[in-house]
Image: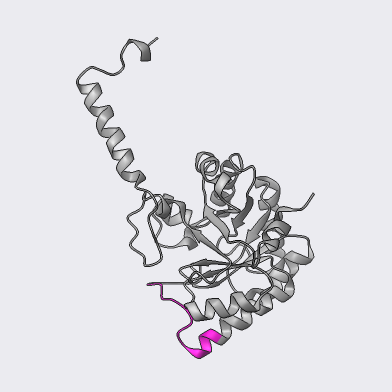
Amino acid sequence: MISKIKKILNKKNKSKIICLTSYSKNISEAIDPYSDIILVGDSLGSVLYNYSTTRKVTLDQMIEHSKSARLGIKNSLMVVDMPYRTYRNKKIALKNAKRILKETKCDAVKLEGGSLIISVIDHLIKNKIPVMGHLGILPQSVIGKFKFKGKKNSERNKIFNDAKLLEKIGVFSIVLECVESTLAKQISKKLKIPTIGIGSSKFCDGQILVIDDLIGLNETKVRFVKKFGQIKKNISNAAKNFSKEVKNKKYPSKIYSY
């Protein structure tokens, strides 16, 4: 039986990889048939808890949401973000990664960064922990406004070299967040492993979006976000109709009562 990670690797240059975030069972069930990868991202900090930064997200929060999301995933590869400060050295990273895999039954973890954390990622992979990389904008490292990456030559060279380094030590894919289009294309063409873009052009091997942005539950106005649904309006309409029927004594009628 071919592994889920092998299936992702085999999609390189063949078909686009679909990746979405989920933080709960119900959302996972809805998106699993259409996803190749489901990421339980630390984006849940801003999406669910209104944190100003993902740095506030705890390991316990990630694990609890991942346990819920896992219940709705049957086909997709499940990846869990390792939150800020949970991989600050090899020993801590391995301990926390093992805990995540054991308690959530996920397939892999994702870490943000390149050369600065390369020894940590290498240690995880050598201890049989599958790792997804993440380059470009690194939300756990950003304080203030996000700016796309790859405008300066020094920045382009750093990201490109980090991508090659991550591939060399054995990550199975790399998220490229807000990386300038020609650089994202260059990296995707050069690497043998898939790139997953977010705001990094159609040239990546796959694309990821935060589910709340995708379905229109957030008011996010970021350049790379396209709303493929308007679920917030649907929720408002449902609440409006419920309120109206209760006030008019139409609900609950006899068939909705014991």
Looking at the picture, how far across and down is residue 257, in whole percent? 37, 12
- Outermost residue toward the bottom? 153
| Image quarter of the C terminus | top left
**Residue 255 occupies quadrant:** top left
- The answer to whether residue 179 of the structure is visible from this angle is yes
Name the residue nearer the viewer: 97 or 135: 135
| Left or right: where 5 falls relative to 160 | right
Q: Is residue 213 above or below residue 53?
A: above
Task: Locate residue 82, reporting x and y percent.
Answer: 60, 60
Residue at position x 32%, y 55% from top? 219
Q: Quadrant of residue 19?
A: bottom right
Does residue 38 lie above or below 255 as drawn?
Answer: below
**Image position of 129 with respect to 75: above or below:** below
**227 on left or right of 177:** left
On whether residue 152 falls in the magenta region, the answer is yes
Q: For the view shown, which residue lies furthest in the front direction?
A: 14
Please provide percent x and percent y for residue 221.
Answer: 33, 62
Residue 248, how many percent across, how many down? 19, 20
Q: Which residues are magenta?
A: 145-156
Identify the residue at image location x=42%, y=53%: 214
Magenta-highlighted stretch: main secondary structure? loop
* Residue 114 in sight: no
Q: How many numbered callouts?
A: 0
Decide whether residue 73 is among the magenta residues. no
User: Which colour style is shown?
Assistant: one colour
- Tell me which residue sits at (53%, 72%) in the image: 203
Which one is nearer the viewer's eye here, 116 or 12?
12
Task: Give the residue drawn at x 59%, y 78%.
Answer: 187
